[in-house]
Amino acid sequence: MARSSLAALPLLLVGAAMTASAVYQDNYFFLQQDLYPGSTMTLHLAAAAAAVALPLPRARVDATIPFTSTKIPEILSRLSVPAGSPTAAAIRSTLAECEAPPLAGVAAQRCATSLESMADFAAACLGTRDVRSATMTRLSRDGGAAPPRQQPYVVESVRPHPVAGGDLVACHRMPYPYAVFSCHTTTAALYAVTLAGAEDGAKAKAMTACHKDASPGIFWPTYKKLGVAPGTVPVCHFVPQDSMLWMRK
């Protein structure tokens, strides 16, 4: 990947009634050396959907709604979801992924069905209740109109974001009728990146994670495409708007 351009690196910010307002395509990565003021990348942006899956209180979820593939008929009934609908298929898919064994190299992994359980998991992994979450990608444009789906963006600034101890917990939104996050431990250097649209001046502030050893979440073809071997140089990606990163204060 040339230093002068990060062409064809999409940051997809899309919406659906059952998912959050941002979806990150996890097969798109770039090298840390390519992230610097003045570099150019082509990003795919779209308006966020109005309807998103909202979080439910832990007391309600734990007491009234099962979260296991062994009770899918009961889940569909309680959530008033038709058995043959796309939403039902998404429920089955999410449950299967949440019940799968953790990825190799990941110290801890769990699906959180409430904000309270997500915060508890982060605190347990980080060894302290004194944790905070990082601000994710944010978009803005004069007049409030949606930016075009794709255009070149120029990196205006790259500012390091401190991570105490170097380890953190990443939680990614899963497709479900209410907010469910797949959380896992990881290590990364974080950067707050400001981008400006070359065509319409649309602005984006994107949190960027660079992993020195991201092999548990990045497959060999990606490293081959980048022209590097796993663990040799930091590999980066933008953190989508619907994800949360937890770290020590």
Image (cartoon, rainbow, N blue to C red):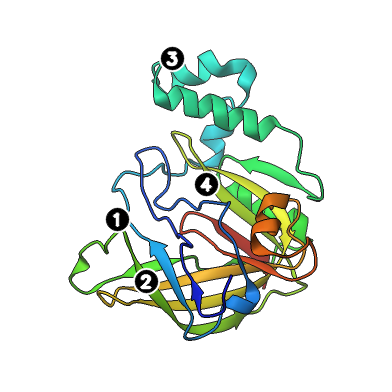
Q: Which is more foreground, mark 3 or mark 2?
A: 2
Q: Which is more foreground, mark 1 or mark 3?
A: 1
Please identify the quarter of the rendering in which residue 158 is found.
bottom right
Q: Secondary structure at mark 3?
A: loop
Rendered view: 56 above or below 157: above
What residue is shown with label 3? 83
Q: Amino acid at mark 4?
A: Arg
Could you tell me which quadrant the N terminus lies in? bottom right
The disc label shown at residue 138, or none: none
Q: Which is more foreground, mark 2 or mark 1?
A: 2
Give how far across and how far down residue 247 sits, in percent: 67, 66
Work out how far the residue at label 3 is from the one at label 2, CA to CA, in angstroms: 43 Å
Give the mark nearest the N terminus, 4 or 2: 2
Give how far across and how far down residue 154 sits, in percent: 41, 79
The disc label shown at residue 47, or none: 1
What residue is shown with label 2? 152
Q: Secondary structure at mark 2?
A: strand
Q: Does residue 242 appear left or right of residue 203 in this picture?
A: right
Work out how far the residue at label 2 is from the one at label 1, CA to CA, in angstroms: 17 Å
What residue is shown with label 4? 173
